[in-house]
Image (spheres, rainbow, N blue to C red):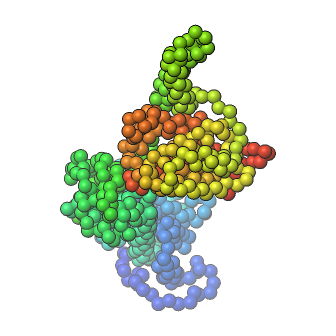
Amino acid sequence: MSPTLRRTKPRDSPPVTAALVPPVLPARPAPAGDPGEWPAAERLTRLIRDATEELARPRGYEEAVALAAGCTVPELADLAVLALHRPDAGLRFEVAHRDPARAGPLRELLFHRSAALERAAAALASHPPVRSFHWIPHLSDRLALRYAEHQPELVELARRLELRSLLLLPLRAEHRALGVLALGRVGPGTRFSALEFAALRVLGNRIAAALQTAWLRGRVAAEHERRAAAESAARKWSQVFEHAPYGTAIVGEGRRLEAVNCAFALMHGFAGPEELVGRPLGALQPERPPERPRESPTDRVAYETRHRRADGSQFPALVTETALRTDGGRVQRAVTVQDLTDLKRAEERFHQAQRAESLGRLAGGIAHEINNMMTVVQGFADLLLLASDLPEHLRDDVEQIQRAADHAAGVVRQLLAFSRRQLLSPCPTHLDRLVAGTLPLLDPLLRPGIRVETRLGLPEGVRVRVDRAQLEQAIVNLALNARDAMPEGGTLTLATSVRHASREPGAGSGFEVPPGPYACLEVADTGVGMDPDTQRQIFDPFFTTKPVGSGTGLGLAQVYGIVKQSGGYIWVDSAAGKGTRFTIWLPVVEAEGRRPLERGRAEAGPEGA
């Protein structure tokens, strides 16, 4: 048996019996006089009762530890050391001293001896309870050496603390070792009696129970906090799931939808999530995904496909599937769906702009070369017509050459407009007046059966900086295009308004439109409309849907160049059989001392195309 665990009872000490301190003594009023003069049994009974009442009150674990160490000082001991063994953090000391100023230095001293103290405390706490209590009424150097023959640093520690009497009590609760409570007395002639040793054994059980209760209460509180935090996190993630701007769904066995958010339902044309729960995900995917996700808990796959709406229409989608492992071992999948319609439209129009830019540079170079050659042709034709000896039968031929050169010069001007290399004379212009002034030019150009409607509503102070003649030419070209699209007649509408680009660049329309006020001109017809393939090429030079010989295919290309050279933007909305609407945005500028339209009076930006 280890010397540290040996029970020692000096010869002059009376035997220890449980009868010395009854488990429960009747409460009696405190006697008058100095507590030191009270009968020992009555004083210890009151100490146990008061300490038990304090220990029984609900409190946190840290408070319980401090109370456990301090409830015996100074009534029972000059010094108390509570050593608690925590598996996750080693030995923890709580110190109480008759002189509170010495508690801090004493705790520091014990900390430096923590290794030896931890070994001794662990050995004492793990020993069977029947033999692990130690009562040393008189601690001499010889006796200390017997107890600590393998740990001389403990003997030195006892000397520095001036210990004269010692009680060691292991603390256990539910067969679990909590630690050791050590009580000491310092100075000569002070010893622990057998009655005090018995009182400590009773009090030790109360201390152990209080520590265990506080620890369990802390565990319960921590568990409640953990569950509350988990529930709060679950509620937050539920809100994220419900209010996410992109479609999200949980797919279970058979790839059936177990839960979907509102965005997922609205994206697919359903009124609410409940209409989709239970349906197979494949019912929304007319195309088979390029790669089926593997049933792996760490698998994630993303792919582009098309999804079907409730009305049967389809839209491009980016789908991401991530495997989820449930508590029951089932593998579910979190599926996110993003509608790529706007992105695809923006990409398409970006490519259109790139193509138009490339064609513009090509057209500009060709136009300059043709213009140089036509200048020579026109010059020589003019000289031939001025010659007096030109035969009359050749004069008609020279005039035909001159007319062809003039026509070629007109084509050159259109090409220069498309390539944005023509010379403009811009000035602040009220767009409503310009449109109204163009209407007389349209009357002889439009066929019978075509009705012209105008909705002109720009404020008086709104101006755009344009070349009036060129913008009139653009309006005429759009009207002629509308006329050809309405062979049986219809309605041509010219409308103006003020819009404000307040959203992110490129949102909806696919154009990088800087924020600010714009004067908007819409030219709409009720004609045959255009399919998507035609719309992609509508502004390309020499592209036309008319029969051969009916047009050069430069009218809309010229419109595009005029608008872009004026700092504006143009796009088309059309569908086969539903007419066409060209929309032109021109930035509002200051004119006549007026400031541009304030943001508060502006309308929303375009919704698409």
Residue 67: percent from the left, percent from the top? 51, 70
Relative vertical location of residue 526 with respect to residue 219 in this rendering, above or below? above
Q: Which residue is nearer to you in this view: 189 or 37?
A: 37
> Residue lying farthest front?
392
Q: Nearer the viewer, residue 67 or 587?
A: 587
Which is more toward the observer, 570 or 484? 484
* Side of 282 where 597 appears, left or right: right
Where is residue 20 shown, x and y percent of the image? 41, 81
Identify the residue at horizontal 26%, vertical 68% (top origin).
Answer: 278
Which residue does the image show at 42% across and 81% down from the upper left? 21
Q: Position of residue 1 (x, y in %)?
A: 27, 58
Residue shown at 73% from the left, 44% from the top? 590
Q: Residue at x 30, y 47 (%)?
A: 303
Q: Residue furthest right?
A: 593
In this rendering, the answer to whether 111 lies above or below 425 is: below
Can I make out residue 540 in this image?
Answer: no
In the rendered structure, the answer to whether residue 89 lies left or right of residue 585 reads left
Where's residue 568, x and y in %? Answer: 59, 41
